[in-house]
Amino acid sequence: MEVLERRFATIGARLKTGEGPWLGVPQIDIGTDRRGEYFDLRFPGGDPVELDVVDAWPGERHLLLLVRDGADKSKFLCGHDERHWFVAAVPESARGVSGVAQAMLALQPESVRVAVAAKKPKDPFRRKNAAYVRQGEWFFVPAPDLAVAGSKVLRDEPITRGRGSPHIVEYVYRRGGELVYVSPRYPHGLTHSAFSALAERVRKSTSWTTMVRDAEVFARGRVRHRDHATIVLPTWHRVEMNTEQRARAMRHVAFLD
């Protein structure tokens, strides 16, 4: 524990764990006390696990945490983004992730990596560069050839990955996708047939919002979120989410935004 605390301290972060032995892959959250935010690890029970910080970038305030659960390995990028600490699960399908740089690359969707290869920005991980603009888990890639009729543009639309507070986009254009019904109980949405199959008392006992899932989404104008500085997209940009949702270890991450 002392070794882990020292490694987290190198990026200016505090680490706390619950009482008891390190059994089972920990649930990772961001807690808050009188001193501010800290990384909170809670162990659910199970087989013994090992934790190790395999790389740290003190200047960028990022580190890569490795959790060994028998033959299985889970990796988590822990760091500071604008105003708050965050943790992101790295997809297990990404090979050769042995440090912070590879973890950040693994979290970039394919379209972002293509744009980076084409534009060759000086800093490929900067929140705003020649290839993209990023706000939290969302990437915005320029789409200079896109032309959209004004009647198809939506105003002040939320984009969300199912949990956490949404990012509000001033102008949105969606192409394709599936209409779903979203509520606090069903944050990932229900299709029309699944919604219709619910008991009438369930449909009427909660508030529902209709959203579009798995659509091509394009954004322009201001993008707002309570935990991030507002960004302004003067032209249309394709909206892409990071790859964290592909990680099995995502189920161990409690803090999302």
Image (spheres, grey):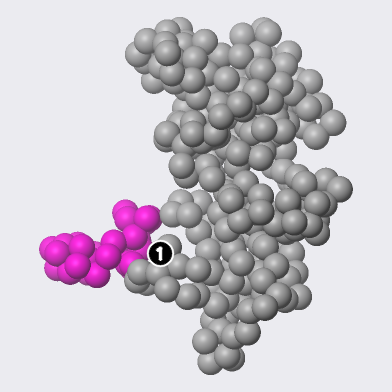
Residue indicated by mark 1: 213
How busy is the neighbourhood of tag 1: few (under 14 within 10 Å), some, or many (20 plus)? many
Identify whether 224 is placed above or below 253: below
Q: Name which quarter of the figure residue 173 lies in.
A: bottom right
Residue 3 pos. (x, y %): 68, 8
**Disc 1 residue type?**
Arg
In the rendered structure, the answer to whether residue 79 lies left or right of residue 69 reads right
Residue 73 pos. (x, y %): 49, 20
Residue depicted at 80% across the width and 34% down the height = 60
Residue 198 pos. (x, y %): 16, 62
Magenta highlight range: 180-208
Residue depicted at 77% across the width and 46% down the height = 124
Q: How many marks?
A: 1
Give whichever of 11, 63 is nearer the camera.
63
Give whichever of 129, 35 is nearer the camera.
129
Tell me, yes or no, whether the highlighted magenta stretch contains residue 204. Answer: yes
Residue depicted at 50% across the width and 51% down the height = 164
Q: Secondary structure under badge 1?
A: strand
Residue 28 pos. (x, y %): 52, 29
* The N terminus, quarter of image: top right
- Residue 36 in view here: no
